Amino acid sequence: MKVDLDAIEETAKLLYIRALKVLPDDIKDGFQRLDAAETNATGKSILATMIKNIDIAEDTDNLLCQDTGIPIYNVTIGRGVEVDGIDLKTAIGKGCARATTEYPLRSSVVHPMTRENEHTSCGRRIPVINVDFSENEEELVIEMIPKGSGSENGSFLKMCIPADGINGIKTFVIDRVMEAGGKVCPPTIVGVGVGGTADLCTKLAKIAATRPLGSVCDDPEGAKLERELSDAVNSLGIGPQGLGGDSTAFAVHVETAATHITMNPVAVNIQCHSARRARATFTLSGVEIGF
Amino acid sequence: MAEHEFHMPMTEEQVRSLRIGDHVVLQDILFGIRDATLIHMFDRARETRLDLKGHAVIHTAPNVKKVPVSNSCPAGYESVCIGTTTSARMERFTRPLMEKNGVRMIIGKGGLGDDSAEAFKELGGVYLAIIGGTAALETTWIEQILDVDLDDLNPESLWQFRIKDFGPLLVAMDAHGQSLYDAVRDTAQDRRAQALARMGVDS
């Protein structure tokens, strides 16, 4: 399959705008589940307003949240796909910039030191474009995630040592969720990376935080930790917006990687309740847009 | 848990009548500020021509569309999507905003810290919690962008909005030293050991 770069650019634009407006079904279902179980009156009323906002965004064709985030594009290239990598990245960058200037969206991206805003949602190394490969024949997938800053600021890494064991990891996650409190816009998806190197561990936490609700870590040890941490985090009483309640997190997601005999790293990356994603799948029969 | 409606600006007495847990709806005028606005106002001594005395400020940076100046868009901007950012980053600016500019209410999400609580008590101010991430709804409470200053910082300019039925907002920190966030933090701290114990961790 030969990739049409104009279609990539258009799709990169469309995905950014769509992600900002329509929440995936798994997140909508997650809200219903939390709302049904919430026992705190303030928490319940906040969840109701969040659910109302999802409807208003769709009814008024508006953005769910004003934070257009840092744009992230996850590209997965299947077998038999012909594309020049540099051209592909350029087309995605152009689509991202056009979404910003043509819609127009707020550009939330600045140079880290001068704080200059190019008003394109682009800058040095931004959008983040991650490229991976899959076994799927003649298929290219682009997932777009506008990552909000309130929750991204709730990111933490600790190079625990082997003697800290799994208990060191559990304690770190609980303490960071408490520290983040209402600042990360709960209910959240708490992404936890365990193992790897420092950079891989942090990346795993991001993958975990942006995984669909209902998905389970494919490492049984990670899956067990997800269940335990989800239960523990929601027993703290932090609640929606940190104003009290049972619904602190939709879930805790864990991703794992092998690590060094001397290391025991853990990272936390949090996704806010506006857990936005959009996905395009290119195949020989055309483009399909979904989550 | 009283319900209040205020036409902006407000008096110190009105602000001091509020208690945590009360609900507030605001009318008429609201100012939008955030990180860069405050850094420039207080760390780089830039002055604004807008009068914030007795007013509410919201921690925001909106999505706007540049349009020709008209009666409906006097600042040359039309609102696209306006919502609220995390307040904690702006903690150290609460006191100067109140002392220098006479601000009485701060609207945000996630809460402010001890220094702000002290400033609210001493100078007569409150923190109103809005629900973060519900900008589509919040946008429907904003009628117009009336004015803009320090616009070289766009989108982190100082915005003046005309509002209608802005709320309900929850009084989360009042002028009597009370904070809903402190209560939740204490609860979480009390439950921490039990949360760890259910995962087999002694603390």
Image (tube, coloured by chain):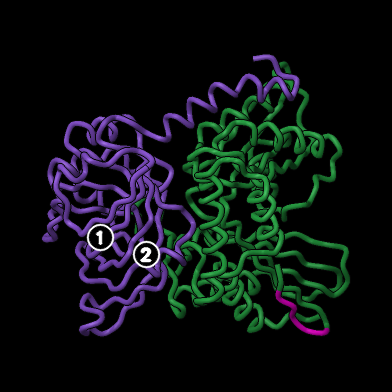
Q: Residue at x 51, y 32 (%)?
A: A179
Q: Residue at x 66, y 21 (%)?
A: B194
Task: Count the numbered circles shown.
Answer: 2
- Colour used to depict chain B in the structure image: purple
Residue B7 in percent (x, y) is at 21, 59
Residue B47 in percent (x, y) is at 12, 54
Q: Residue at x 36, y 67 (%)?
A: B141
Amino acid of disc 1: Leu
Output the letter for the chain in green: A
The label shown at residue B30 is 1
**Chain letter for the residue marked with disc 1 in the picture:** B
**Res. A4 image quadrant:** bottom right
Q: Secondary structure at mark 1?
A: strand
Residue closer to the observer: B173 or B78: B173
Residue bearing mark 2:
B62
Q: Residue at x 64, y 48 (%)?
A: A206
Classify A107 as above or below A46.
Answer: below
Residue range highlighted in magenta: A285-289
Q: Residues within 10 Å of mark 1 (few under 14, many from 20)?
A: many
Magenta stretch holds residue B124:
no
Can residue B35 be seen by looking at this rendering? no
Can residue A287 be seen by looking at this rendering? yes
Q: Main secondary structure of the magenta part?
A: strand
Amino acid of disc 2: Pro
The label shown at residue B14 is none
**Chain letter for the residue marked with disc 2 in the picture:** B
